[in-house]
Amino acid sequence: MTQSHFRFASVGAALICLAAGSVHAQGLDMLKGLGGGGGSSALGSMSSGSLGNAAGVLEYCLKNNYLSGDAASSVKDQLMSKIPGGKPASDSGYVDGSQGILTGSDGKKMDLTGGGLKQEITKRACDFVLKQGKSMI
């Protein structure tokens, strides 16, 4: 391995470590089980989040092309119609969700924004919230 290859590999390894640290630091450990292992315990702390936050996250996912189609939009709209007071903009869960912040039933927050390694995790989280939203309707 030449010195330039070694430097490139070292930089790559450092970036992976930084990304992994960033992913962990932002609470993505709440996504255990999303890797395809299945089971009903996947995202357990997210399973009973608020209607408002679920609607907001779906808004974020649709706006950023993690989800598409009339079905996802319909679920989001139906959830929004159930937000107490009928004003999503005044629901802090919705506001957070629409900015890409997923709040679990335990109060932990997970930032879905960003690119790179987080894109796959965000896509899976969006799919999960869509399924969860259908059950909340």
Image (spheres, helix red, strand yellow):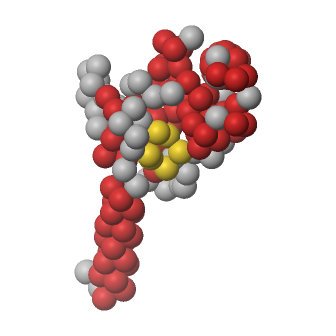
Asked whether the viewer can see residue 98, the reply is no
96 or 30, which is in the foreground? 96
In-image side of 39 versus 59 (left or right):
left
Q: Residue at x 57, y 37 (%)?
A: 93
Instruction: Please state the total of marks drawn on the protein image.
Output: 0
Q: Is residue 18 left or right of residue 1?
A: right
Tell me: residue 41, above or below residue 23.
Answer: above
* Image-quadrant location for residue 104: top left
Q: Measuring from the top left, give residue 62's x and y in whole percent.
A: 66, 33
Viewer-nearest residue: 1 or 130: 130
For residue 69, above or below residue 1: above
Query: Where residue 27 sits in the image (x, y, percent)?
Result: 37, 50
Residue 17 point in image, percent of width and height: 31, 66
Image position of 134 (left or right of 110): right
Q: Residue at x 64, y 17 (%)?
A: 82
* Among the 4 quarters of the image, the one containing residue 3: bottom left
Task: Check the picture and name the quadrant holding the N terminus.
Answer: bottom left
Residue 44 in sight here: yes
Residue found 36% across the figure and 59% down from its top: 25
The image position of residue 129, as x and y in percent, is: 49, 27
Q: Residue furthest front?
A: 85
